[in-house]
Amino acid sequence: MATLSWTAAGAGWQAQRSRAFAFGLAPSLAVLLVITLVPAAALLVGSLTPLSLTDPAATFRFDDPLVNYRHLLEDGRFLDSIGTQLKLSVASVALQLGVGLGLALLLDGRSRILQASRTAFLIPMVLPPIVVALIWKILYTPDISPMHRALEAIGLPVHSLIANADTALWAIAVADTWQWFPFTMLMVLAALQTLPADPVEAASLDGASRWQLFRYIVLPHIRPVLVVCGLFRLIDSFKAFPLIYVLTDGGPGTVTEVTNYYGFIQAFNFSYWGYGSAIAVVILAGVFLLSWGVGKLGWNSHEHPGH
Amino acid sequence: MNHTDQGIGRRRLLAAGAALGAGALLPGRAPAQGGAKKYQGVTLNVSTFSAAYPKLLQQWLPEFEQLSGARVNFDAPSFPIYNQRADLELSTHGAAYDVVNVTFIYSSRWIGSGWLTPLDDYIRNPNLTPSDFDLQDFLPGALAPESGADGKLYGIPWTAEALLSVSSRFDLVQQAGLAYPETTDDLVKVLRAVNRKERVAGFVSDSHYGWTFVPYLHAFGGDVFRKAPDDLFPTLDTPEAVAAADYYANLLREFGPDGAITYQPDQVTQALKQGRVNFSDAGQLHLAQLGDPASSRTIGTLKFGQVPKGPAGRFPGTSVHGLGIPAGSKNKEAAWAFIQWALSKKTTARAVAAGYGSPARRSDIDSQAYRTRQVINGSDLARLALDSIEQASKSGHMKYRTVAVYPQVDQQLNKAIALIASGQAGAKQAMQQAQAQSIAELKRSGLSL
């Protein structure tokens, strides 16, 4: 009996605690709901209509809610834009991870020169995206570009990289890498500073080479950080906009037109908000799926690969 | 030091001029009556794209503010940025802007969708508009695109310009023993003779090909739509259109500078001013800047002409931009006071005297000040533009441009020419693709084709 009343009292106390937590969390949840879920729901609702801002009254209707999604399946430009998006995302994220990791390994030390270099390498990341785009617009415009002039001076003239269909996407990937490799560099540097000295020292005494030290001790230690960086940058790469807007406008032709940019054209150049919303919903679903897939790969486990 | 003194002197002179001329410049009784400042406390948000006339207005704003009492925020971003921003703002019936530029390509879309305010009642009201505003002084061809299907006027034009041809290094053409190219065949002959001479590329144009390419499309006997504005079925894959696209993309590919397909209007103007590119087609607004002795290195070698004739004739592009009031504005009366100040006879004449190159008032176009300034190195830019505008109003070939769905087709033309010029597709394939995508876009807009 005593046990029962104690259990009931405990349950009551726990319920009270849960209610107090819920009460405390309620304002935050309400704000979260308003600023994230409501716009997302509006996007989804909009995507089920042929809404055009030139005639919103007549086009905000739900008589054929899947019309936009059916059109997307037949829209060659949209389907091509997905391929372009994947190419750009994979190329720029791989480059950012490679360059960021390489520089972090080179700059991992305590000297003043290395500290100053680390600070200098962070500059691209803190510049506003439109400024980055303008810097690269100058670099990629042969008439005014110091890069083109220097290459010409040493007898290696290069044609405009953003006007050439074979190089335009790579030119954007390089500019994007320049802006965002510091993010990976910073994260990896932080991880390297938590690397315990003992295993490295022990392996060195056992005769491990620098490559073996990196492969079997450093890389397993920083791998979770690299995965997080990759995932962050991958998700962010789907939002690529200012570089494409300023450098190529999606061209030449549609060779740099990523899905995000195509959605922008449909919504803001042509006022097809329903269709633009459907494109945005597809991007949203794609990013969710991709994040989930990357998580499922198990790369973010802290366990040793042997386990 | 001397330079600074001159600067101060100029500022003093401007200030004195402003004080003296302000009363006369402010039209009639509109903004200030009986000494009271009628729009005291009102803040007007004005937005246009960046161009010569808005820049002059920005300089003279303090005069309007002083006399009307209104405060004016004047925003003038680049052409594409302005259009996107204004299109979005107008479509939501927002009150962010009180005065906007009515962009030619969007005029039908904005007017037809009810996003602008009819100006007829303001013009007719003698308390708001003095008789010397004289609406009839504006070119009829410039007022037409600012009018709706309901016959009402939605914008007052500040520019009526034509797409003209230019050779910045005509001396090279003369050295080759050739004349200014009159036809599309002549143009290729001349370009073959002068291309890369003295490191000057032959030809470039603004990558907005939905504007720069269309005179060639017409010249080859093609068109954008079957018969705008009544039959809007696109006609981008006809043999004539394919031939025109092939011809034009080849001009860029064979004679263009490195990266020709990425050139924006300002880049084209700079390339012509510096003599890095010889031939181009550009709006008169941009070409008039080539006559600036302070910044143009080619002022002594340039020559202007009309866009070349093709097998079907000559079809110069024309364009009109005006100032209008958004339907969502909360300061419409003050906005109208601003527009009539900005486009009063006195203000436009003052702009012409300051070197403005493409006015829309007949009195300005006929003025001696304007005609004298528009003769640059012996080429009469004003005459060429007037002839082009007259020709366009007779033939009606510009009707394609103000239909509400043209922005969608315009973009397909931009893509098609870039695809051909960059070697990604043949002319036939690119134009067939443009046709198919234009049809899809127009159907999405609700048109039954």
Image: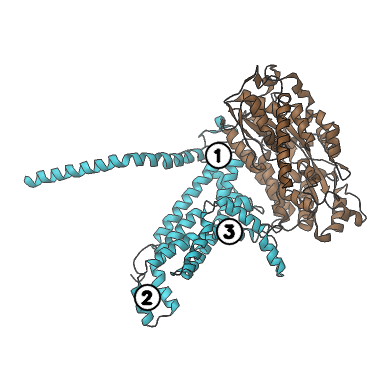
Chain colours: A cyan, B brown
Residue A229 x, y percent position in the rendering: 45, 60
Earlier in the chain: of badge 3 and badge 2, it is 3
| Mark 3: few/some/many CA within 10 Å (<14, 14-19, 20+) | some
B377 on left or right of A200? right
Name the element at disc 2.
helix
- Mark 2–mark 1 distance (CA, rounded to whole Å): 57 Å
What residue would you read off at disc 2?
A: A200
Residue wearing tag 3: A175
For marks 2 and 1, give the one nearer the viewer: 2
Residue at point 80%, 47% (across, down): B293
Looking at the rendered structure, the secondary structure element under dot 3 is: helix
Amino acid beneath label 1: Trp
Q: Position of residue B326 (x, y in %)?
A: 62, 29
Mark 1 surroundings within 10 Å by alpha-carbon count, few (fewer than 14), some (14 through 19), many (20 or more): many
Q: Where, by quadrant of the figure, is residue B227 drawn?
A: top right
Report the chain holding disc 2: A
The amino acid beneath tag 2 is Val
Marks 2 and 1 share the same chain: yes
Q: Is residue B86 above or below residue A262?
A: above
- Please report contact status of discs 2 and 1: CB closer than 8 Å, yes or no: no
Disc on res. A273: 1
Q: Which secondary structure, mark 1?
A: helix
**Residue A206 coordinates in the image, percent (x, y):** 36, 82
Q: Are marks 3 and 2 in contact (CB under 8 Å)?
A: no
The circle drawn on residue B437 is none
Q: Are marks 3 and 1 in contact (CB under 8 Å)?
A: no
Mark 3 → mark 1, Cα distance in angstroms: 30 Å
Amino acid type at image mark 3: Ala
Q: Does the rendering let one see residue A28? A: yes
